[in-house]
Image (cartoon, rainbow, N blue to C red):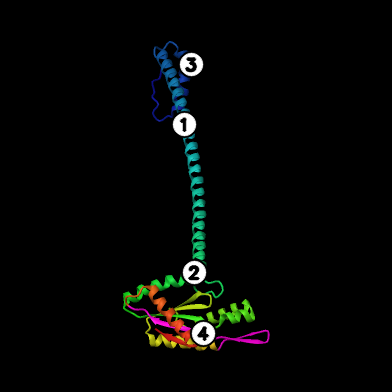
Amino acid sequence: MDAAGPAGRDEHTFLRELEALLADPAQQDNPLTPALARLLALHRQQNERIERLVRISDGYHGLSRQQTSGLADKFERQVRRLEKLARISDLYQSNLRDLTEALREASLKDPLTELGNRRFLMERLKDETGRARRKGAPLCVTILDVDHFKVINDTHGHDAGDEALRRIADVLRNSVRQYDVVGRWGGEEFLLLLPEVGLDEALQTAERIRSAIGEIAIGLDGATIRMTASLGLTRQLDDDLPSDTINRADNALLAAKRAGRNRVVVR
């Protein structure tokens, strides 16, 4: 038997040559033939075991890849679902904030005149009181009442009265500074907060408003409605509570009415 080794040859070629050698009748009496035959059989057995292991390994890895891919897909779907829920939640929160703010604004606004209502004015009075004390600045408060307003309602109807209040609201908006505060105190009464002005300047503002209200003319069914207003003006004192300032302005308003209306009284 030629004992040439497998150097430079691939395994399959070597095995085919070995099988041919063992099958050669001339080599049957060779003492190495049985040993080589056993070695070839052992080699084939080992190859079969290795192939089974490879198949098992491939199947395991394939299953593992499928499971990993399945988990990744599930994770991705969950992430997309959570992102969608987050967007819905953000939109809901935004809408809720907008609704809350709209409700808050509505709760502080007089629907007829679109000025701030009594609640709004009380909140702002507290704010302005605190600011005035921190800055050591003056704060003047004016209460305005439409003279003989009941006559307008009784003679021309409530629609005419509503229009009169809206026209007065327009006068107030156009007669004050941007950072002054005006609102409907209730009924035909209005309140003005004039921060950082003394009584002299506040009195000029009040007289300008009184004069502008006297110039309002509402045409209705051939008649012309004209109005006047009485105003009570005061300056907040150092030890005043907000209610103290309001009461003093209200007393000044009462004095203006008793003095004949259509005037400003300072207390």
First-in-chain label (1 vs 2): 1
What amino acid type is highlighted by mark number 3? Ala
Magenta residues span: 215-237
Residue assigned mark 1: 60
Q: Residue at x 42, y 18 (%)?
A: 42
In space, the residues marked 1 and 4 are separated at their CA atoms by 94 Å
Q: Quadrant of the N terminus?
A: top left
Q: Residue at x 45, y 12 (%)?
A: 28
Check if mark 2's residue and mark 3's residue have beta carbons within 8 Å.
no
In this rendering, the label closer to the viewer, 1 or 2: 2
Say how many tags the image has. 4
Q: Is residue 94 above or below residue 205?
A: above
In this rendering, the label closer to the viewer, 2 or 4: 4
| 182 vs 157, nearest the viewer | 157
Is residue 255 visible in this depiction of the protein?
A: yes
First-in-chain label (2 vs 4): 2
- Mark 1 residue element: helix
- Mark 4 residue element: strand
* Residue 229 badge: 4
Image spot of residue 255 (x, y percent): 45, 84
Check if mark 2's residue and mark 4's residue have beta carbons within 8 Å.
no
What amino acid type is highlighted by mark number 1? Tyr
Check if mark 1's residue and mark 3's residue have beta carbons within 8 Å.
no
